[in-house]
Amino acid sequence: MTLLQRLLKNTDLLLGVGLLVVVAMLVLPLPTAIIDFGLCIALASAVLILLSAVNVEEPMRFSIFPSLLLVTTLFRLALSIAATKMILGHGEGGHVIETFGNFVMGGDFVVGFVAFLILMAVQFLVITNGAGRVSEVVARFTLDAMPGKQMAIDADLAAGLIDEEGARTRRKEVKQEADFYGAMDGASKFVKGDAIASLLIIVINVIGGFAVGFFRGEGDAIQILQRYALLSVGEGLVSQIPALLISTASGLLVTRSGQERSMGGEVFSQLAGQEKAILASGGFLCLFGFVPGFPTLIFLGVGGTLIAMSRYLKKNGDMIESLFAKKVEKKPVEAAPVGPAPSSPEAVMPLLSVDALEIEVGYALTKLADVKAGGDLPERITATRRQIAIDLGYVMPSVRIRDAITLSPNTYVIKVRGEEVARADVEPELLLAINSGGVVQPIPGQVVKEPVFGLDAVWISREVRDVAERNGYTVIEPSAMISTHLSEIVKAYAAELLSRQEVAQIVENAKQVNAAVVEELVPNVVQIGDIQKVLQHLLRERVPIRDMVTVLETMADYSGRVKDPEQMGELVRSAISRTITRQYLDHENKLYCITLDPSLERRLTDQIQMTAGGSILAVDPHTQQTLVRNIREQSENAMAQGLQAVVLCSATLRLPLRRLVERYIPQLHVLSYNEVSSRAEVEFVGQVQAEAEAAA
């Protein structure tokens, strides 16, 4: 391995050593040759940075620029301090500094000093100040736009336009862009500080040099001032020309927006399309050529050149544009893979796949799903996914949004596994005012039934929104109604939507928290399918499955004795009693319960039968109707008092009773005694009497 290869393998170490050398330059005296070499390196690096900023296709490809600016600024300041010590100590500054001083001054240090001040004013007041302001504005707007870009990425992910890998890549790009412009905002302060420091250094050099030369008796005042002014201005020019180039590069980077090519290509391609402007400019210059006192030949020559250029661009505009078009990397042409024959089974296999969740919309509702048109439906679906993950601990599948010409313009359909499960109509230009029971005065509008909960509602115009809210209506956007409808559908069909693949991901996530229980349980004791059945058992009654560690530990405890997934699910319910109870508590931590008469509960328990479909209540139809009617009466009495009551019974009876009740009263929940948390304050609001069973 060569020395160069070894150095390239340790670039981080080289950079660190280089920074230590720069710091050492601030303290140690340097010989003239080293100062000349350092000034040459500073000038070359500034030219390299400027050319890189001009030719880079997009600013993010030169993201190292803020750090590079800091390093080069420190390097130039170290050279300036070393040169100052050389000038004041020995009355010389090296060949580079003396040459720059003689070249600019032309033998007159007053003219040279004025020229240097003009250069400093150009850099400090124009380029540095403008680049700093642009950096500040771009950084602020980039950071302000960051949440919107993140939501757009989430919306595309929810709509299925990109996958998780694409979303991660785009989020990384958004973060890098914000970090870059934020760093550029801070880096612009280095350029400004460098300009101020250089001005102070040259003043110190002139005054200090004059004082040192006078006390040393190096000549009269004019000779001393001329010598030290020459060296000081030369040193200032050598340090400020690289600073001017780098500050120009900084301004070029932050002012480039929406460019897909290098700056040169953009300039020529955009100006080449303005042949009329070029023609008019040439005509005006030709007219100025006839003004007395103006150099006629120069104005006519430049104007004629512009006129000839405009005619050439008009004839060859397409050719010029093609020369500066963005180069597309050509890939070698590969033979197209031979696809399946149209009549083969493989040709129709893609048609057999179905989306887990799908929303079909009529053409009038497509703008609700179009982010570019201001639609926020994908954003609301993303929020729905987050909320369901929080409420149920279940990751909702991606939702495919499609337009369907077979639907009415204002109709949408929600499908689960390719089959329709819900349908409703939406007025995209109106708002839905829902009467949730506290309306003071009805407002006019299109009266409908809210499709999610069946409440009375009115479609109203956006102008009367404030009036509707003051009258007690709950006003929501059309997209909010669709996303809420989708949320309820997902909760109702969560057990069906939970696949083995998603269970495997949930288990893998739990493994990161508690690897011991997962490794003990899967796959030695139970399979992913067994865990899926237990989780589906919980989700059917909307029991959250966020506490996967407790679920898996309970399964590990009882897996040797219990093989039935439903029985295992009931044991898991008892283990997460706090989670279950919390769903039905009011704000005072009270749980309102309807109980069964003890004799009735014993008779129902005796009539439990085990079937292939699980445990059921084998009662005759008349007894079943009477039991359901009495439970409904007790539930409605509790609702009339504004209470959300649950039916409380033994653990053995809970599941069979729930299966019986859910067919008639699906919104009523049935809990067992051991599923009630000890922290809940239980209050009994009704009891189903044994006479119902006795009468049967």
Image (cartoon, rainbow, N blue to C red):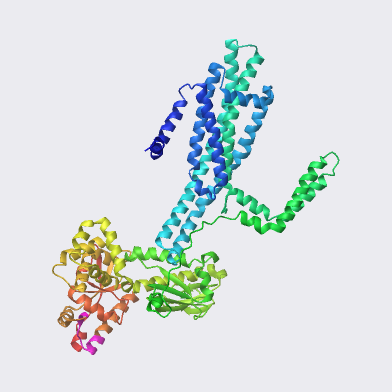
**Residue 264 x/y as whole percent:** 61, 48
- The foreground one among 641 and 521 is 521
Where, by quadrant of the figure, is residue 316 drawn? bottom right
> Between residues 197 and 659, which one lies in front from this camera angle?
197
In the rendered view, tell whether residue 497 sits above or below residue 612.
Answer: above
**577 in relation to 496, above or below:** above
The residue lying at 49 percent from left, 81 percent from top is 406
Q: Quadrant of residue 625?
A: bottom left
Counting from the top left corner in percent of width and height, residue 487 is at 39, 70
Q: Is residue 232 above or below residue 678?
A: above
| Camera sees residue 585 | no
Q: Residue furthest top?
A: 217
Residue 600 appears anywhere in the view: yes
The answer to whether residue 490 is above or below residue 612 is above
Name the quadrant containing residue 621: bottom left
**Magenta region:** 613-625
Towards the viewer: 5 or 335: 335
Residue 209 highlighted magenta (yes or no): no
Magenta-span inclusion, residue 614: yes
Picture coordinates of residue 600, whole percent (x, y)? 18, 81
Quarter the C terminus occupies: bottom left
Q: Position of residue 396 (x, y in %)?
A: 36, 67
- Quadrant the N terminus occupies: top left
Q: Residue at x 26, y 56 (%)?
A: 513
* Residue drawn where x is 54% and y is 64% of the image: 372
Residue 22 in the figure: left or right of residue 599: right
